[in-house]
Image (spheres, helix red, strand yellow):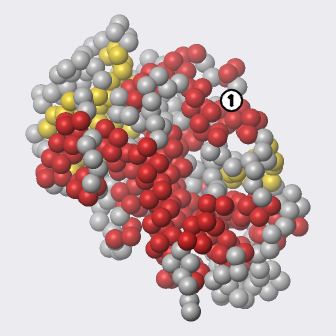
Amino acid sequence: MTYRPAFAPASGRWAPPLRSLAAALLVAAAGSGCGDDEACPGANEYGVCDISDPACVRQVAEVLGCRREVDAAPDVPIRFTTRDALASELFGSSDNVSDDEILWTNRAYAALANFSLLPPDYRFEAAQADFSATIGAYYDPTAKQIVVVTDSDDSARDAYVTLVHEMVHAQQDAAFGLDRYAREHAYTEDRSLAVRAAIEGEAMTYQLLAEVELEGLSAAEINWDVYFSNWQAGMLSIASETDIPLILASRLFPYAFGGQMVFDRWFTSGRGGVAVALEPPPTSTRQVLAWPRTDAPVPPWNQDEALMDRIAPEMPESYVSLGWSFEGTWLIRAMVERKGRDFGPAEQRAVELIHADVLSLHYEASTDTAVAVWRLSFDDDDARSVIQASLEETSDMQTVVLTGGDLVLIAGGPPNLVDETTPWQALDEARTRLVDFSRPPLWPNPRRRSYRHVGCQHRHLIRHALVRVP
Ligand SMILES: [Zn+2]
């Protein structure tokens, strides 16, 4: 795809890289030869141990490698750190983030606030704190190590299950390279969340199996439909209620929804099913959200190529472009839920019929005005009418239906800034207008990614979904 470079973490993007991802794929070389969970000689059971003990780490790697039918990733180092230290590692000190970058980020945030994806007056410093607060542990594919935050109040058991989760990522990285997988598949925000759903989905699958085993249960005793629908309902309700849906997208979406996508495959087809879920990964959040109702054959879920020559509207001369991105169904849904009238089945269905979108951000200096423009392409006109009506009723955003049927939402700025006659720029044209803040990476460590874990919550949900067998 020729447009990939536009999504390099340079001037064109406004989303901090933590919500994108580092991911990976599965070319699972058959490993140690154990065919089922009962046949892992030498290391056939999980058992809570002290994760600061190298023998404990080896035990987890060996049991997991056996279950996943891959080589254990031996000797993965674990580094322990505090939340404060992590925050400054992930975001860098104020010394290496320039004032220009911070100013640029804050303007982009102001534009995004017009769509209620962030609160008004959201700032760089708040984003740092909000991100760091959600991280319990992660696998770092650059340093090839697992990083664990020590000042979370995890029990030894939670820490152990966290290690299982992160060890999946270490083994994924060893098998197919998380960074390479991300470069190949995760080149837009939407695709990035979808790829994370595959990667985190597998990690959640094996984490859940470990949780179940530690409870003394078997996977067959759990009503997984109940488990996942409760978890997903919780994530959806947070997404509609939080004032930072943009920041939380990479927390709320990949685990609960990717988890079900991969777990279902494991449950019906074992390791082979997991491999199918990851190769190729889904291409859109839309595809992952539709998972419970769909199976192969897969329709062309993501059609964002169709918008490559219509990235952003031609704005008046005094506006500079802050960036653009393909956001996808998860964030569109959060926006419609927060900005529109009551979000019912009709709105939900209509959102899922959006097959491409592009969001562009613009800034006018003399009036200090930030504007966001979201172009949506629908599978059918009825769906478009539902979304348009919902937003027109309850918000001050302007809506325009273009020849050809796309719906354009304009939030912030004076009336009639964009109308049916406004020309749209192709990617190359839009790029040349971009660069007022040309410093590269907004975040000093753009390749660091985090993988969150919440052990307690899952045990609670699992117990709720227990099937009582008489
Ligand atoms: Zn993870």
Of residue 353 and residue 1, the one placed in the foreground of this image is: 353
**In the image, ligand 1 is in what quadrant?**
bottom right
Percent of width and height locating residue 191: 43, 51
Q: Residue under label 1, please give it.
A: 92
Left or right for 139, reference 325: right
Left or right placement of residue 429 versus residue 434 in this view: left
How far from the left and from the top, in percent, is residue 318?
30, 12
- Residue sitting at 21 percent across and 43 percent down? 390
Quick check: 345 above or below 2?
A: below
The residue drawn where x is 51% and y is 78% is 223
Task: Tell me, yes or no, if residue 26 can be seen here.
Answer: no
Q: Which residue in the rendered view is the most extreme toward the top? A: 366
Question: Does any portion of residue 249 appear in the rendered image?
Answer: yes
Q: Is residue 314 above or below residue 339?
A: above
User: Residue at 30% of width from left, 61% of height from top?
Assistant: 300
Q: In this picture, is 208 found above or below 270?
A: above
